[in-house]
Amino acid sequence: MGVHVLTRRSLFGGALLLGPLLRTGMAMPPDPMLAAIRLAEAADTAHRAAGLVSASRMAGGVLTPEWRAERIATARARFAARGNLHGLTPSTRAEAVALVRYYADRVSHADPVNVRGASRAAQRRLREVFARSGAYPLDRTAWASLAPVGPPPDD
């Protein structure tokens, strides 16, 4: 006869093993648009951070090959995340507002010299997305409330 003793270590180990299984089994599937926005935000943040670090790592104005490869990897991850996001169409109000806020955040992080260009690019991308069939119709008042992108210009 073996005595099974529940120790703190065995309880924590069981929780670590069963935790992800219980969470995925009971949770609703994540919204693909919101998940893509979170991934794109994380990729943008990583790319910005890599740019700040690369400026401090320049020795004589040249990046080391290892750091250059790291910077290229973050740029590729950001490009892939944005590509996945651009392929989706917002079908609910929450998705539409999250997408507009994502672009507003991108404009707010733009270089001060290029804010106008970034704002126009964001407006153009959002007009394309909301013109797709099945897209949630985002009215001008909701768009205008999400500064700094502002209302879309009349074409």
Image: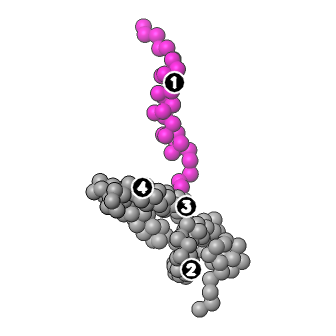
Q: Are marks 2 and 3 in contact (CB under 8 Å)?
A: no
Choose the circle earlier in sequence order: 1 or 4: 1
- The residue singled out by tag 2 in the image is 116
Above or below, comparing residue 64 to residue 115 in the picture: above
Crowding at mark 1 (Cα within 10 Å: few <14, some 14-19, many 20+): few
The residue lying at 43 percent from left, 10 percent from top is 2
Mark 1 touching mark 3, by CB under 8 A? no
Image mark for residue 11: 1
Residue 82 point in image, percent of width and height = 45, 67
Q: Residue at x 54, y 55 (%)?
A: 30
Residue 12 seen in the figure: yes
Whether the residues at callouts 4 and 2 have beta carbons within 8 Å, the answer is no
**Mark 4 or mark 2, which has the lower sequence index?**
4
Badge 1 marks a residue whose secondary structure is: helix
Q: Nearer the viewer, residue 111 or 148?
A: 111
* Residue 81: percent from left, percent from top: 43, 63
Measured in 3D between alpha carbons, the distance from the residue under mark 1 to the one under mark 2, in whole angstroms, is 56 Å
Given this view, does label 1 or label 2 mark the residue nearer the observer? 2
Is 17 contained in the magenta span? yes
Of residues 63 and 71, the one nearer the viewer is 63
Check the image and name the residue furthest to the front: 60
